[in-house]
Image: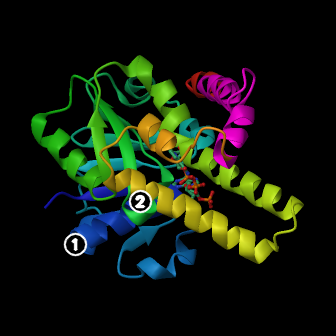
Amino acid sequence: MKKILLVGCGKMGGALLDGWLDFGVLPSNIFVIDPMSVRHSEWSHVRMSTNITTLPKEFHPDVIVLAVKPQIIDDIASLYAQFDNAVFLTIVAGKSLSYFARVLGNEISIIRAMTNIPASVRRGITVAISNDSVTETQKESCNDLLKAVGDIVWIENEVLMDAVTAISGSGPAYIFLLAESLIIAGEAFGLPKKLVTHLVRKTVIGTGELLNQSHESLHQLRHSVTSPGGTTFAALQVLMKQDGFTSLMIEAVTVAIKRSRELAN
Ligand SMILES: NC(=O)c1ccc[n+]([C@@H]2O[C@H](COP(=O)([O-])OP(=O)(O)OC[C@H]3O[C@@H](n4cnc5c(N)ncnc54)[C@H](OP(=O)(O)O)[C@@H]3O)[C@@H](O)[C@H]2O)c1
């Protein structure tokens, strides 16, 4: 069984940890480093520490998962360069394979992945890319760890990662905002907050499940609920005007991509 060192146990690291434990990874094969490890009472059966110096001598990690914020990776990445037989699996937004090769060493095996927050309910979507040093066995191990929290797609062109980050990494926040906006609109027309919140949550959940089960395209699904001249049609005329929803979304994704590129350095 592979030994996993998880660095950073916040929202994403915690989601991964839960997924691995559900998937059957033994707690004894996991060690977590997080500065506030004492707060994580729900994982009391997993060994945790606030820093690398207390990692037991006999614990030789096969996979090191980096799940800290991009803003602090510069300060900590080099601490892990000593584990040069391990594969590094990084989910840190914006930080490239060449960044990690520079900090950890050119021969180090590195997999860069972009996952998203539905991973916390095992419905994440992860896009991953490996460098030339990664062996098939290391790739399989990381594939298993990522599959424990949802689906995974492997790509070969790292340039796509900034756009992936802006679409699926940040995407759940856009959907939440859409739902929040719909609630505000409902309240503006007299629907009580509790009722409209319930309606919107169920609408998003139900639509997601329909999408999950349907073989129709998004376009077909939208058309199937839009009668010409009806209420939905009227609303879509506004959302689909030239400077409407799609152009706003393109603008939002553009700045997210720009930010991802800024974080790379
Ligand atoms: N959240 C998302 O939707 C999402 C989606 C895609 C990718 N990501 C990527 O996932 C990574 C983690 O994001 P997150 O949302 O999980 O952030 P988060 O909730 O803030 O988790 C980061 C964790 O790292 C801990 N940490 C801070 N300094 C550390 C150190 N020196 N050693 C070990 N752990 C340390 C933090 O502890 P403290 O809180 O005490 O500082 C926190 O528990 C980011 O790089 C982000 O780009 C996130």
Q: Is residue 239 visible to the viewer in this orientation of the structure?
A: yes
Please tell me which of labels 2 and 1 falls first in the chain.
Answer: 1
Question: Which residue was labeled with disc 1?
Answer: 26
Q: Secondary structure at mark 2?
A: helix
Percent x, y for residue 52? 44, 56
Residue at image x 60%, y 42%? 72
Which quarter of the rendering shows the N terminus? Answer: bottom left
Question: Which residue was labeled with disc 2?
Answer: 209
- 220 horizontally vs 149: left or right: right
Which amino acid type corresponds to the residue marked 1 in the rendered image? Leu
Q: Is residue 133 above or below residue 150?
A: above
Span highlighted in magenta in the image: 231-257
Res 250 → quadrant: top right
Dominant SS of magenta comes to helix
206 or 28: nearer the viewer:
206
Which amino acid type corresponds to the residue marked 2 in the rendered image? Glu
122 or 190: nearer the viewer:
190
* Residue 53 marker: none
Callout 1 environment at 10 Å: few (<14), some (14 to 19), or many (20+)? some
Number of callouts: 2
Magenta stretch: includes residue 111? no
Res 240 → quadrant: top right
- 2 horizontally vs 261: left or right: left
Which quarter of the rendering shows the C terminus? Answer: top right
Residue at image x 69%, y 50%? 177
